Each structure stands twice: as structure tokens, then as C-alpha cells.
Image: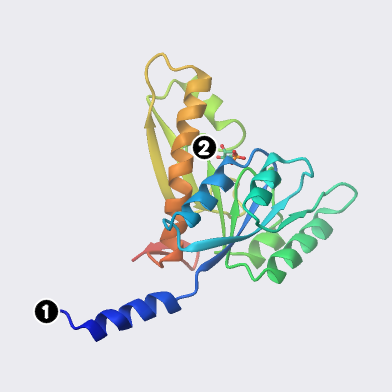
Amino acid sequence: MKRRPDILKNARELAASVPRLRVAVLVSGRGSNLESLLRASREGRLDADVVLVVSNKADAAALDVARRANVPTSVLPSAGLTREAHEAALAARLDEARVDLVCLAGYMRILTPAFLRAFEGRLVNIHPSLLPAFPGMDAQRQAHEAGVRVAGCTVHFVTETVDGGPILAQAAVEVPPKASLDELRDAILAAEHELYPRAVQLLATGRARWIAGRVVFA
Ligand code: GRF
């Protein structure tokens, strides 16, 4: 059947009228996952814009990544503040930037239940293991010490259970028998850089949604 050009035009207009997801990325360190999200957005693989990068560390290299990409940054140190005061400042900054989704990318702070409630269903994290295996600190070392033959990474919604929220996407990495810890870290990180933009794209396109505490796929 021949497709009518006016139908095509309407589909194009509809696609152009769907607002792009406004994303904030919270960082504390290197910023390689931030960089992968920025690259995917720039290259048209991600229908989302990183509109704000917030760091709790003034010297985080991730801030330079953001500045190079002309993304607004905020530094919100926590020293001398209560958790509640620090997170109130963070929430205010995120609201002011009209953020749809908050991506944690190496953000080294545990968020309070009040903050998690305020951002329920709009907060995701990337963790360097195939959850629920190896939650917590230095997941790559845990995987290496356990001698796993398959490792990987997970993007999940953030809830009060640390590294325990509903899973949005995962990627597996085969571990060669004699892989060193550094080789394992590098392989997992490369998988993270592929996975995070793909996971956020699921949300940006509505192919996955948070509904009443679960991830529902279209
Ligand atoms: C990544 O391994 C991520 O999985 C973990 O922290 C690390 C952050 O790295 N949550 P980078 O700052 O994105 O380079």
C-alpha cells in the first residue's frame, strides 16, 4: 500500500512535538557515564537532554565533562549541613531545572527516604554488577573474588533498599578465566557506557515506565 505523504508528515510533526526528557545527572567523581549519556544525546541515540549536572564534590572530574559540553553545573557540598538541609538544596535545584529524570552516575551518597519519596519513579542508578548479585561497595572486586564467569552492570530505579530497586536494564560481560581485577573493571565500565543511554532511552520513549513501584515494559 502506498503511504500517504500527509500521514507521514503528521507522524513527523507528532514526533517533533513530544518533549524530550529533561535529565539531571548526579556525580561525585570521574564522570565517564555522564560522558556516555551526553554523547548518546548528541548523536541522536537518546531522546533526552542533560540539563543539569550536580556534584557534591567541587573537584569532581565529572564537572569538567559537563562544562566541556556546556551543561549547567551545581556544586552542593554536604559539609556542615544536615542530610535534610543538603537534600532540600538538591531537590530545589532539580525542581528549578524542571527535571523529569535524575540519573545517579557515581554519586557517592545515600539518599534519605524523604528525598526518595519526592523523586519516586524519577530516579535511576547504574551499578557495576548484575544485581541482585554484589550490591554495595566495590562490586567489581566482589565479582572478581567470587570468580564469576559472567559479570555485568544494572540500571535500576532507586528505592530505600540500597542497590535493590526495580531493575530497568542489564548487560552481561563474559569474564575470561585469567582476567585481572582491572581488566574486569574495564570490561564492566565499557558495558555501562552502552547500557546507561539505552536504559534512559527506554524511559524517554515510554517503552518502560515506573508504575506503582514496578517497571512495566510496553
Ligand atoms: C561506575 O562504575 C558506576 O557503575 C558506579 O560508579 C562508577 C562511576 O564511574 N556507580 P563514572 O564516574 O561514571 O566514570
Which residue is at a point 65% across and 56% down the rendered structure image? 70
- Residue 41: image location, x then y, percent: 49, 56
Q: In terms of depth relative to the viewer, which is nearer, 53 or 207?
A: 53
Residue 80 lies, with reference to residue 218, above or below; the image says above
SS class, disc 1: loop
Q: Quadrant of residue 33?
A: top right
Mark 2 Cβ inside 8 Å of ligand 1: yes
Task: Please indicate whether residue 153 sits to the left or right of residue 103 in the image.
Answer: left
Q: In terms of depth relative to the viewer, which is nearer, 168 or 183?
A: 183
Mark 1 Cβ inside 8 Å of ligand 1: no
In the rendered structure, find residue 2 and report the number of the disc placed on it.
Answer: 1
Q: Quadrant of residue 31?
A: top right
Residue tagged 2: 128
Colour scheme: rainbow
Amino acid at pointer 2? Pro
SS class, disc 2: loop
- Residue 155: image location, x then y, percent: 49, 48
Residue 30 lies, with reference to residue 203, above or below; the image says above
Q: In the image, which is nearer the foreground, mark 1 or mark 2?
A: 1
- Residue 130: image location, x then y, percent: 44, 38
Residue sticking out furthest to the bottom: 6
Amino acid at pointer 1? Lys
Task: Please indicate whether residue 103 sits to the left or right of residue 153 in the image.
Answer: right
